[in-house]
């Protein structure tokens, strides 16, 4: 099995396992998860796979072919454990700032808000995107550069870790609160929650109400970035509800800025 196939198998297995567990728990009934939500996820998966990946790969190929000639496989000799922390941190750092700016800058927010309009958190929200948002994700660009430079295994490991953590923090099951209550685990989680993103902090980012924190908790995995830049909030509570106060036309959510419909009343 190639590295590419292994990554695909792991991602698909984690995603489908989460969907199954959530479905068994009643989190994908028509009452909690509409066809609108499922359609958004399907559109996001399609855009990321069929549009963003090929487009970014083509642009990076053209850039390195015309400007940085002779660099193909140039870093293949670099040891995995030297390259991995650099690539992983770069992805996390770039995503933190893209995510933060998408909540601070109006035009970026219109691209990102589709991810936040979900009324419930579950595995489908992982791919709930405006289709053009997928073109901005730093992981896609960094991945294409890594492949060109001969660091595909490094990138594969980094993206798998990010995907698994991202999946575990979007699930409706609050496994972190359950583990925290186990004997001797509270001190462990008091430290862990300041380093790694957990459902507690990411649910707060998506939440509405008293324990919400939409303007913070931006990191995918390295929550220490939020601690460093002063955007962290650790509620240690379940959120009252999720989503956005208003509602938008589905065409605008998926295709803004090509489609501009504005808010619609519930």
Image (cartoon, rainbow, N blue to C red):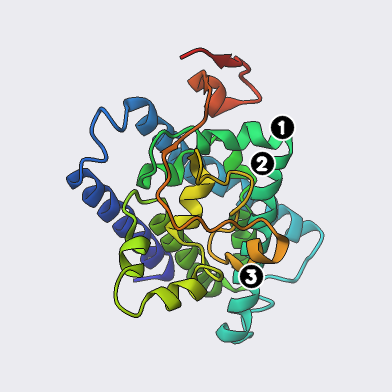
Q: Position of residue 16 (x, y in %)?
A: 28, 52
Instruction: Label 3, secondary structure: give it.
Output: helix
Q: Label 1, on which residue?
A: 107
Instruction: Label 1, secondary structure: give it.
Output: helix
Q: Alpha-carbon distance for marks 1 and 3?
A: 26 Å
Query: Callout 3: 10 Å neighbours few (<14), some, many (20+)?
Result: some
35 displayed left or right of 99: left
Residue at the location (21% across, 40% down)? Answer: 26
Labels 1, 2: front one: 2
Residue 49 against residue 93 in the figure, above or below? above
Q: Nearer the viewer, residue 238 or 19?
A: 238
Residue at the location (36% across, 61% down)? Answer: 177
Q: Position of residue 95 (x, y in %)?
A: 63, 56
184 displayed left or right of 24: right
Q: Earlier in the sequence, mark 3 or mark 2?
A: 3
Q: Position of residue 114 (x, y in %)?
A: 53, 33
Q: Label 2, on which residue?
A: 103
Is residue 88 visible in the rendered image? The answer is yes
Query: Callout 1: 10 Å neighbours few (<14), some, many (20+)?
Result: few
Q: Alpha-carbon distance for marks 1 and 2?
A: 9 Å
Q: Position of residue 85 (x, y in %)?
A: 61, 77
Q: Which mark is residue 160?
A: none
Q: Label 3, on which residue?
A: 89
Q: Quadrant of residue 224?
A: bottom right
Residue 264 against residue 105 in the figure, above or below? above
Q: Nearer the viewer, residue 142 or 257?
A: 257
Q: Earlier in the sequence, mark 1 or mark 3?
A: 3
Q: Alpha-carbon distance for marks 3 and 2?
A: 21 Å
Q: Nearer the viewer, residue 155 or 128?
A: 128
Query: Callout 2: 10 Å neighbours few (<14), some, many (20+)?
Result: some
């Amino acid at each position: 099995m190639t590295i590419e196939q292994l990554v695909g198998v792991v991602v698909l297995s984690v995603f489908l396992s989460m969907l199954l567990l959530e479905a068994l728990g009643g989190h994908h009934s028509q009452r909690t998860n509409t066809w609108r939500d499922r359609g958004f996820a399907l559109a996001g998966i399609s855009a990321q796979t069929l549009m963003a990946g090929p487009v970014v790969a083509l642009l990076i190929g053209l850039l390195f072919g015309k400007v940085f000639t002779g660099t193909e496989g140039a870093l293949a000799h670099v040891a995995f454990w030297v390259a991995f922390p650099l690539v992983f941190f770069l992805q996390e750092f770039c995503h933190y700032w893209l995510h933060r700016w998408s909540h601070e800058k109006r035009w970026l927010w219109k691209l990102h808000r589709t991810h936040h309009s979900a009324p419930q958190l579950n595995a489908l929200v992982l791919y709930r995107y405006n289709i053009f948002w997928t073109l901005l994700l730093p992981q896609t660009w960094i991945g294409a550069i890594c492949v060109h430079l001969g660091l595909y295994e490094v990138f594969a490991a980094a993206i798998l870790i990010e995907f698994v953590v991202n999946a575990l923090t979007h699930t409706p099951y609050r496994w972190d609160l359950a583990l925290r209550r186990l004997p001797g685990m509270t001190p462990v989680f008091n430290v862990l929650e300041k380093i790694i993103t957990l459902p507690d902090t990411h649910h707060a980012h998506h939440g509405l109400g008293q324990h919400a924190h939409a303007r913070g908790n931006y990191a995918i995995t390295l929550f220490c970035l939020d601690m460093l830049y002063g955007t962290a909030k650790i509620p240690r509570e379940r959120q009252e509800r999720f989503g956005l106060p208003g509602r938008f036309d589905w065409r605008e959510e998926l295709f803004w800025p090509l489609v501009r419909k504005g808010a619609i009343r519930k």
